[in-house]
């Protein structure tokens, strides 16, 4: 099972989102997602988070919170455990991303943008400021067929 991180940087009631439109054979192509990527061998989720946010945005996080774990099960893609974070502090200047277009999207408009159906579930949990959560999402192809959300501890 691959492990990944995903972070939503928050500013002025908006999240920094990434429109995936530059990589070939990208399973996220055409969708808006948070900032993140795969853990490297021996890397902790926090270390991966810091590295990926810097690589994709040029920003160094100074204040972030571990918010939940999402387990993806799929008949088409590798199963995945994703560590979800939000961030409210960073240093640096935002730079273009080689994986897609970065844009600050108001939280109230998020669900009008194309995204994975499961992403909308945990984004709603973040928006409601729910406590740490565990979410299991099961996909058949690109279609969400089941989900289970529960509060948990990190």
Image (tube, rainbow, N blue to C red):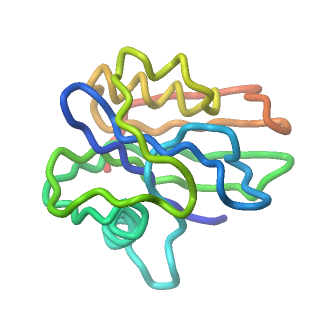
Q: Outermost residue toward the front?
A: 96
Question: Residue 11: x percent and y percent?
Answer: 21, 36
Question: Residue 14: x percent and y percent?
Answer: 29, 29
Task: Please indicate whether residue 34 sits to the left or right of residue 91 in the image.
Answer: right
Say if 69 sits above or below 115 in the image.
below
Say if 48 sits above or below 106 in the image.
below
* 150, 83: nearer the viewer: 83
Give me the residue at 76% from left, 36% from top: 139
Give me the residue at 54% from left, 67% from top: 38
Task: Please indicate whether residue 81 sits to the left or right of residue 48 in the image.
Answer: right
Q: Outermost residue toward the bottom?
A: 42
Give me the residue at 79% from left, 59% from top: 25
**Quarter of the figure that contains the N terminus:** bottom right
Say if 33 sits above or below 22 in the image.
above
* 12, 65: nearer the viewer: 12
Residue 2 lies in what quarter of the image?
bottom right
Question: Residue 130: x percent and y percent?
Answer: 30, 26
Question: Residue 89: x percent and y percent?
Answer: 14, 51
Task: Please indicate whether residue 71 sits to the left or right of residue 60 in the image.
Answer: right
Residue 148 lies in what quarter of the image?
top right
Residue 129 lies in what quarter of the image?
top left
* 50, 121: nearer the viewer: 50
């Amino acid at each position: 099972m691959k492990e990944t991180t995903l972070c939503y940087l928050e500013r002025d009631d908006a999240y920094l989102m990434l429109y995936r439109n530059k990589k070939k054979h990208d399973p996220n192509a055409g969708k808006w997602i948070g900032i993140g990527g795969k853990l490297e061998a021996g890397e902790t989720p926090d270390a991966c988070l810091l590295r990926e946010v810097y690589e994709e945005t040029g920003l160094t996080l100074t204040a972030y919170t571990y918010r939940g774990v999402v387990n993806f099960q799929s008949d088409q893609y590798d199963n995945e455990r994703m560590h979800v974070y939000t961030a409210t502090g960073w240093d640096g200047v935002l730079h273009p991303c080689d994986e897609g277009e970065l844009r600050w999207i108001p939280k109230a408009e998020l669900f009008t943008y194309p995204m994975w159906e499961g992403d909308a579930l945990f984004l709603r949990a973040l928006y409601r400021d729910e406590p740490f959560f565990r979410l299991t999402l099961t996909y058949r192809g690109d279609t969400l067929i089941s989900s289970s959300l529960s509060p948990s501890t990190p």
